[in-house]
Image (cartoon, rainbow, N blue to C red):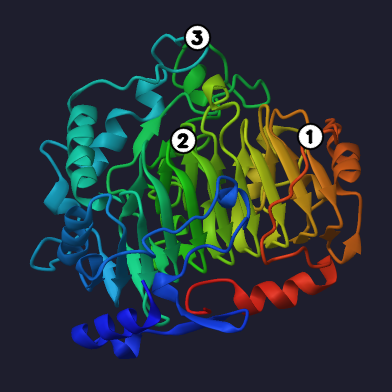
Amino acid sequence: MNRNFLVASCLAMGLIAGCSTLDVGSTKHNISQQAMPAEYGWAGAEGPLLGGSQASEQHFYTVTNRKEFVAALAESGDSPSIIQIRGTINLSSDDSGRELTEKDYRVAPYRFEQYKAAYAPSIWNIKPLVKGRPNRKLSGSQEEARQASADRQKAQVVVKVPSNTSLIGLGDDAKIVKGMLHLDVGVENVIIRNIHFEDAFDYFPGWDPGDSFKIDSSYPGCQAEYVNANIGPQKCRGGRWNAEYDLISISGAKRIWIDHCTFSDGDRPDALFPPFYPFPQNEITQKVQHHDGLIDITNQADLVTISNSYFHDHDKAMLIGNSDKKTEDNGYLRVTLHGNYFENVGQRMPRVRYGQVHSYNNYFVGDASGDGQGGNNYERHLNSLTAKPKHNILRQALGAGKHSAIFSEANVFEIANGTPANAIGHMKGDVAFDRGSMFNGQMLDIIEEANRVSGKFLSKDVGWQPNLYGPAPVLPASEVIEYVTANAGAGKL
């Protein structure tokens, strides 16, 4: 699409005010018709990533609500298409624009209070353990109704994005909220830019009583067999709430560029929903979780670049690979992260399994304190209840998971009360590499320091070398903060 044709299209639609431009080299391009720069990270490994930049006038859309958005995606199909987002698209709304909430999705007899009571550890956990944990397959009318309610919500708030699409926010306030974009198997060649994504809120999170369950003798009364109200597995730590929706799920798709976007929980962070059950099921991590990831990349997804984006005020940001057991992910999950800003994010920036991930010139800011102090888990748990941290506890920024190969360079980590083991965490991985990065104002060999502090060993032999930098050569760490804070996020194109 040439620029004259684009301007004519904008005039015809009354959109000339929204047709902003971006300088790239000496040529001005409308951001809606812009392809990804050549070889800009892993997304460019197999040639040009065009998105919908070659769309005909028929497939050039501007949408202002969910109904228009879904209709544009359906009409365009896999044909090259440009969909411009103006204002706020609420994915949890009906065709009249009315927001849908829990009462619209709820299937009887589900009630949150009744659900929590039915599966309380004092009731559910006293049954015989299954493979050393409380039975993780909940049964009964409340779980059945919760699942039916969740299915109803999912049908409304999950929107599939087809191949050869560019989703572009107009101005500095374009938003997609209260739902999830899903890029499924077979989808490729997608560009997403200049959009605020917020609050993929799950009204029906599920309780998993066996998640992180431990027989820990430091907890009084904790043992595998039930004796009475004071002795048994109900007195052990463990169990988690799990939410369903990411803001963007890249599940089997390939050749994806996400650029200059912003991701957060919006005005409903999970901090508003503290743990429900009493001690010992009231650790900080047992809050009632209504949000899952910000971006998850799973199921043999491949060739993804995420650049110049802002991730903030969320716990678990990004999974690349979602199971240690998915050996079929080996050879996929190749992702580049460049120029991104992570602020008050707890973990997974990203956590990687199997993938080759290049992370460079990213800026990580957080606080590692809050899990409590003491000689054992029980004492630390008690202490953390007194501390009541307001921030998301930064547990690890880059997580080296099973068979991952992270190549980190010239990143900046500012982690209050943390160590290099919080910068690059050992998550059952074997290798990780870093060069030229800064930790709390000092240039360090972060891998060696993380190994020393954690007592866990990561080899530096990752077995590959990045060569896809496009127009964004590596800045020295001393220039990263200024660059990232000026450029990362929606509204900064």
Could you say where residue 476 lies in the image, as x and y percent from the top left? Answer: 84, 67
Q: Is residue 180 left or right of residue 461?
A: left
Apparent side of residue 380 relative to residue 333 in the rendered image (left or right) = right
Residue underneath mark 2? 240
Camera-near label (2 vs 1) is 1
Is mark 3 in CB contact (under 8 Å) with mark 1? no
- Give percent across and percent down for residue 256: 48, 51
Q: Which is more toward the observer, 230 or 281?
A: 281
Question: Going 47% across and 62% down the picture, which residue do you hit?
Answer: 263
Pinpoint residue 71: horizontal percent, then vertical percent. 16, 59
* Nearer to the camera, 163 or 146: 163
Q: Residue at x 24, y 88 (%)?
A: 11
Image position of 195 with respect to 202: above or below: below
Q: Is residue 404 above or below residue 226?
A: below
Q: Which residue is mark 1?
A: 462
N-term-proximal mark, 2 vs 3: 3
Q: Which mark is residue 131?
A: 3
> Amino acid under label 3?
Lys
